[in-house]
Amino acid sequence: MNKKTAKVKCLSGYHSKWVENRIKFILNYFNYDLTDKRILELGAHQGDIGGNLINFGAHTTCVEGRVEHIKRGEERHPDIEWKHVDLDIEKWIFESEYDIILHLGLLYHLKNPDYYLIESQKRCDHFFLESQVIDNSNEEICKIKDPADPKKHGPGQGINAEAQLSVKYIENRLDNFQRFDLKELGGCGHHYDWKAKNDNTYRNGRRRFWVV
């Protein structure tokens, strides 16, 4: 397959445009050539991001905590290597090094968001991180919701908790990062180009994107 002409195929329904935009950002970052790149995607949902990157030369391993997502992902993307792992368990059970680790839309689902945030950076050349955030670039804020809270925003990859994290909290745990507040990354109610007010608000769809 000619990697320059390979097309992105998104199968995520309502979120398809948002998924496609993030795939295209990653591809553009590597000039659409991922030949022999070893990718680990944490919290991969149904594998639409990692599955598409295979078409551009990558070898992708997708990690997911929900069996129903893996089953659907295996149907969509049969070339992915899948691992069923509860990411609330703080133990690195994957290979020691990767070219790329994707940590997209996972951080706020975990009881302890620090473990994979910090550990992943040690184990790859390129770390892509994306998360919904509290609007505060000056103070570290980390709110972990009680799993019994009926207002909790649904099950996470670790199935147990949801974390609300400020921009400052996340960036204090990143090494030599670049942040991309780009309109073209967004879609389907998710956006990255919002103007910070540092007002401690946490709104659905208001996100940031980093590369380490």
Image (tube, helix red, strand yellow):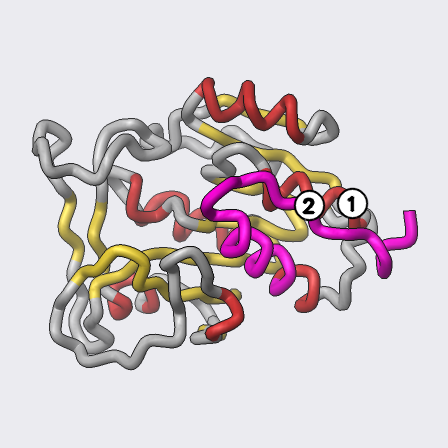
Q: Which one is nearer the viewer's eye here, 144 or 182?
A: 182
**For mark 2, does the 10 Å Cα neighbourhood hold few (<14), some (14 to 19), or many (20 or more) residues?**
some
Given the image, on which type of amino acid does mark 1 rest? Asn
Residue 127 drawn in magenta: no
Q: CA distance from mark 1 to mark 2?
A: 10 Å
As drawn, the label of residue 9 is 2
Q: Position of residue 40 (x, y in %)?
A: 59, 41
Question: Which stretch appears magenta?
Answer: 1-25
Q: Is residue 17 magenta?
A: yes
Q: Is residue 100 left or right of residue 5?
A: left
The residue carrying mark 1 is 55
Q: Position of residue 178 (x, y in %)?
A: 49, 74
Q: Residue at x 13, y 41 (%)?
A: 145
Whether 181 is drawn above or below 208: the answer is below
- Residue nearer the viewer, 43 or 190: 190
Circle number at residue 12: none
Proximity of marks 1 and 2: CB atoms separated by less than 8 Å = yes
Relative to 24, is 46 above or below? above
